[in-house]
Amino acid sequence: MKIGMLQLNFLVGDLVGNTDKIIAGYKKAVAMGAELVVASELALFGYPPKDMLCYKSCLDAQDRELYRLWKEIGNIGLIVGIAKPNHGNGKPLFNGAVLLRKNGQIDKSVGVCDKQLLPTYDVFDEHRYFESGNNPTEIFDIPNSGFFNECVAILVCEDIWGGNENNQSHKLYQRDPVKELKNGDVNTLIVINGSPYYWGKGDVRFNLVSGIARKLNCNVVYVNQIGGNDDLVFDGRSFAVNENGECIAAAQPFVEEILIVDTDSSKTVAYPSDGQNLEDPESIKNLYQALVLGTHDYVRKNGFEKVVIGLSGGIDSALTACIAVNALGKKNVLGITMPSPFSSQGSVDDSLTLAENLGIQIITIPIRDIFEEYGQTLKPIFEGKQLDVTEENIQARIRGNILMAVSNKFGYLVLSTGNKSELSVGYCTLYGDMAGGYAVISDQWKTQVYELAKFINQEDKQYTIPKNTIEKPPSAELRPNQKDTDSLPPYDILDSILRQYIEKQKGVNEIKIPEMFGGKEVVRKVIDLVNRAEHKRVQMPLGIKTSPKAFGSGRRWPIAAKNL
């Protein structure tokens, strides 16, 4: 049979616009020969709708659009994810899937399923809104529906994971919907998803689904949305496998696509791997595409046309500017360089060169006079005090104020430029370089920043990011001859500690680094810096999640606490 897979980019809450997209996609899939069309999880709302699900007016709007969708369906069925009312005890809604049948009708005894496993970990909080489906996974005898000679089961996203996405030895759920299906029960398993991206997750998904196909001896059709929704980015990467677990159809990641899969076909195709490998240009390209899509959608879906970035001559702001240009176009990116008394001429020149290479407008606003005025204003209260981090932070806050002033005056969104390594240890200034509307690279370790910068130059076949920006020792340039390594370990060592502590959730005694780099003493120091900086991170702008454990909704750490 031929199944149309709708890999679409939804605006959360735009029920009318999302329904229009589904209708257009449905009609295109039918014209391409589809005998059944499949949309993604909570497709009318867009995923995740969060507390919109608590408002009756939003649910009423979904009902209106679902009714409109029914009227558009012809002789070909459509499976679509909806928030479905629960008329029994428990939470008021199910996260469900419905099969809309021909002639604008829906038979509630056929083609309806409720999500059975509700994720409540990392960025997910579905128990807040939904009741778990308690019925066994249903198998639908499609011939009785007048479609084709095929038995189909439908599952929703988490239902195929069983809570073991991270290979946890302790299972999260009492049941496993996949295990409730037996080998030979179904011809095709359809899985609708709102599965957010992290670097390498595509391969994790494919391996899981391929194993399920072999276990059940059936085709599996996996449909996912694309797009940036706040801190989450969805890569799509919809695909289908045959009963041997071989890929027979695959949509390209990070783009909308209407894909037709013929489950009877013996042809196999390559799956678009996204293996986590800093040495592989294709792998780095996947990560870069996620950052570009996340930036584009956050800016556009929030009604902005242009962005402004503080260009320091450093690698972080250079990478952020490249992503912004790729996402929005060079005419929509403004750079501002704000040299202080401690800025090197090389960094100023690097900012100007970067802007020229990218073709963006750049404005120079020196902050020496403003900084000196601050000093005079604060002199009476600071009398007798030595210069310290206070004066460094004043420079950062002057720059933050200038960027926000430009944002207010012209309606541009400020993109902040801090990376995950710096944000982890608090090497950032509240209301200074942390000011902004979106933190594009806040989930990129400093070591990843360098690899992304090298990738850009390799793709462009030139030094778009100036060679000096990549090769010079990293520095905030807020005091004479300052280097990041004055107060931090080298970034490869720092990132190794941070990855183990934040992403692998290891403690001091479990984290191993060579004694030549400080051993346990340095590990304790870094972990203490991470914990003491939590108050900063809860005030930073949203960023793009590309790792299994990003700061924000996926990592919840107490601020007023005795840190271990």
Image: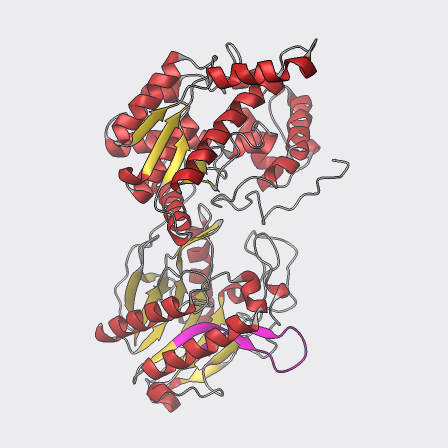
Q: Is 511 displayed left or right of 286 in the figure?
A: right
Query: Relative to 134, is 457 on the left or the right?
Result: left
Helix, strand or loop: magenta stretch: strand
Q: Position of residue 333 (x, y in %)?
A: 33, 37
In this orientation, which residue lies closer to the viewer: 327 or 210? 327
Q: Image check: 103 left or right of 429?
A: left
Count of all numbered marks drawn on residues in the image = 0
User: How far across and how far down the image is residue 371, in percent?
Assistant: 52, 17
Q: Pick the quarter of the image with the C terminus.
A: top right
202 lies above or below 345: below
Q: Residue 144: name its quadrant.
A: bottom left
Closer to the camera in the image, 173 or 415 = 415
Residue 30 forms part of the magenta stretch: no
The residue sitting at the right extreme is 562
Q: Is residue 234 above or below residue 75?
A: above
Q: Which residues are magenta?
A: 79-98
Left or right: 151 as drawn, with respect to 490: left
Which one is nearer the viewer's eye here, 207 or 453?
Answer: 453
Q: Residue at x 33, y 52 (%)?
A: 272
Taking the spot 33% from the left edge, 70% from the top edge, the residue there is 20
Above or below 392: residue 261? below
Whether residue 102 is visible: yes
Its colouring scheme is secondary structure
Foreground: 559 or 495? 559
Whole-percent x and y of residue 560? 75, 39
Task: Give yes or no for residue 97 being in the magenta stretch.
Answer: yes
Quadrant that contains the N terminus: bottom left
Residue 161 in view, yes or no? no
Where is residue 424 shown, x and y percent of the image? 58, 33
Q: Residue at x 28, y 61 (%)?
A: 268
